[in-house]
Amino acid sequence: MPDMKEVYEMVTQQTPPKPDALERQHREQRRLSTKRQVGAYALVAGLVALAVVVAANVLPQSDETAPGRVDPTRLSIVDPETGRTTPVTGAPVDAIGLDVSPNGSTIAFSSKKGVGQIFTMGIDGSYLRQLTDDPHQAIAPDWSPNGDRIAYTAFGDTASRGIYVMDADGSNQTLVVNDPDADELFGEWSPDGTSIVFVREGDPKPGIYVVELSTGARTRLTREFGDGDPTWADDGASIVFARLGEAVPIADIWIMRADGSGERELVARDAWDLAPEWANGSVVFQSGIQPLAFDDAVTLYDVFVFDGSSTRLVIADVNGATWMPSGQLLVAHPAS
């Protein structure tokens, strides 16, 4: 865990950090922030696969709220075109790392309370169920394309940490990515369900990798310690990811072919842009910076859509968001 004051000074004063301090900063950014204790990251060595903090007690099953700034205690479904929000009732107050099942009926998330674990619940907040009971921590759930399995990251000793796959009911938990020499985190299923792309943090050989589940064979796609948050295109032909910029705090959205070739910058705004997701031919991403001066500091992000030519703000000042199969966003608003 980095010294919080040191990280805060780096972020606010833009002081060029030492390499080891930079890595520790981004590791903390990932752990505090989604998709993911950015979970996550959130980049490698610390960009977020962004952590989503939900501050909601039992919410009134009420009407839709008008477009604009929403009640800060609600987990909401947001229409990216109109900005109209509909609250999700019964969401746990400590849910992070949200992911919606392919059929849109179920939310998977991890809980920050005590030792973090993976849970599922209905999109309406019903049928809350704990799936893992890891002695260390389980975070960053990701649904398989057919919705029958969930990948997640577990922390622990060198033999048990890594990326696991389990059935949607929590059974058959299997370690599929593990290296005792490094943290390997934040697995994302390929569209055909045969592979998982993930992030390897720290030396040796950091970067973004793909593992073929049937054989365990892995391929290194990128070689930068500041690469993270990889997500497949819907057709599986390319991967979008976040890459740490030369200055702090800057991260940009990049794209590459599924084999790691053809890297190019997709969105460059001199901002802290993280957690890209494919969304009906566009890319949704989150942008913001967290003042890590205090343990309870709140990470606030703005959510944007990039359509290939222009970038549009969807909603501001949220803890995180994830794209839904319905074409809407599941958004977590900060505690007030």
Image (cartoon, rainbow, N blue to C red):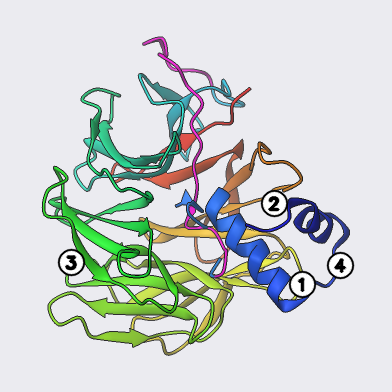
Q: Position of residue 299 (x, y in %)?
A: 64, 43
Residue at screen point 48% across, 87% down = 205
Q: Earlier in the sequence, mark 3 or mark 4?
A: 4
Res 33 visible: no
| Residue 333 drawn at (x, y percent) | 54, 31
Which residue type carries mark 3?
Gly
Give the residue pinned by disc 3: 193
Q: Quadrant of residue 9?
A: bottom right
Label 2 crowding class (10 Å Cα cut-off): few <14, some 14-19, many 20+?
some
Amino acid type indicated by mark 4: Thr
Of callouts 3 and 2, the N-terminal one? 3
Viewer-closest of 216 and 279: 216
Is 256 placed above or below 306 here? below
Crowd around label 4: few <14 · some 14–19 · many ≥20 (10 Å)? few
- Disc sitting over residue 289 in the figure: 2
- The residue indicated by pointer 1 is 247
Residue 116 showing in the rendered view: yes
The answer to whether the residue labelled 1 contacts the one labelled 4, judged by CB atoms less than 8 Å apart, is: no
Real-space CA distance between mark 1 and mark 2, rounded to the nearest whole angstrom: 13 Å
Q: Secondary structure at mark 2?
A: loop
The stretch of residues the image draws in magenta is: 45-66
Q: Amino acid at mark 2?
A: Ile
Instruction: Locate the C terminus by quadrant.
Output: top right
